[in-house]
Image: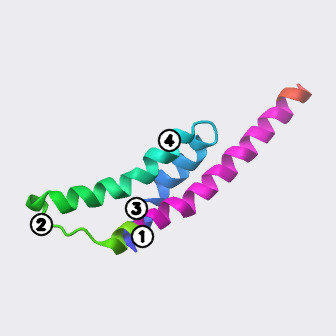
Amino acid sequence: MLNTWLFLPPGFFAGYAAVRRVWVWVIAFAVPFAAEAVQRLARLLSRRCQFQDLVDNTWGLVLRSMLGVATALVAQRLSARTDRHG
């Protein structure tokens, strides 16, 4: 559960930024895979690569990135409306 909570803030900001820059989303979704790969390769960390951690991390990103996208779209619409009406 902690893994899901950990990825909520970056998920929000990735979703918000991805409305204009899709590459941000790609990088954000690569982070959980990279974290698990480092855990698998770096025996010094005494950590194990676990599939469930990957699922939890990604789920946190998905949940919050949807909110980030929605927030960015609302902000764009409000900005466009303000620009039109002066």
* Residue matched to label 3: 6
Q: Which residue: 45% across, 49% down?
A: 28
Q: Please state which amino acid type lies under the numbered disc 2.
A: Ser
Point out residue 37 in the picture as x, y percentages from the top left corner.
25, 58
Provide the secondary structure element on which disc 4 rests.
helix
Q: Is residue 32 above or below residue 5?
A: above
Magenta stretch containing residue 64, yes or no? yes
Q: Nearer the viewer, mark 1 or mark 2?
A: 1
* Residue matched to label 2: 46
* Residue matched to label 4: 24
- The magenta stretch is 56-82
Q: Please state which amino acid type lies under the numbered disc 1.
A: Val
Provide the secondary structure element on which disc 2 rests.
loop
Q: Which residue: 45% across, 63% down?
A: 58
First in residue order: circle 1 vs circle 4: 4
Q: Is residue 73 above or below residue 51?
A: above
Q: Please state which amino acid type lies under the numbered disc 4.
A: Val
| Quadrant in which the N terminus is drawn | bottom left
Identity of the residue furthest to the right in this view: 85
Measured in 3D between alpha carbons, the distance from the residue under mark 4 to the one under mark 2, in whole angstroms, is 30 Å
Q: Which residue: 50% across, 41% down?
A: 24
Residue placed most toward the observer, 74 or 40: 40
Q: Nearer the viewer, mark 1 or mark 3?
A: 1
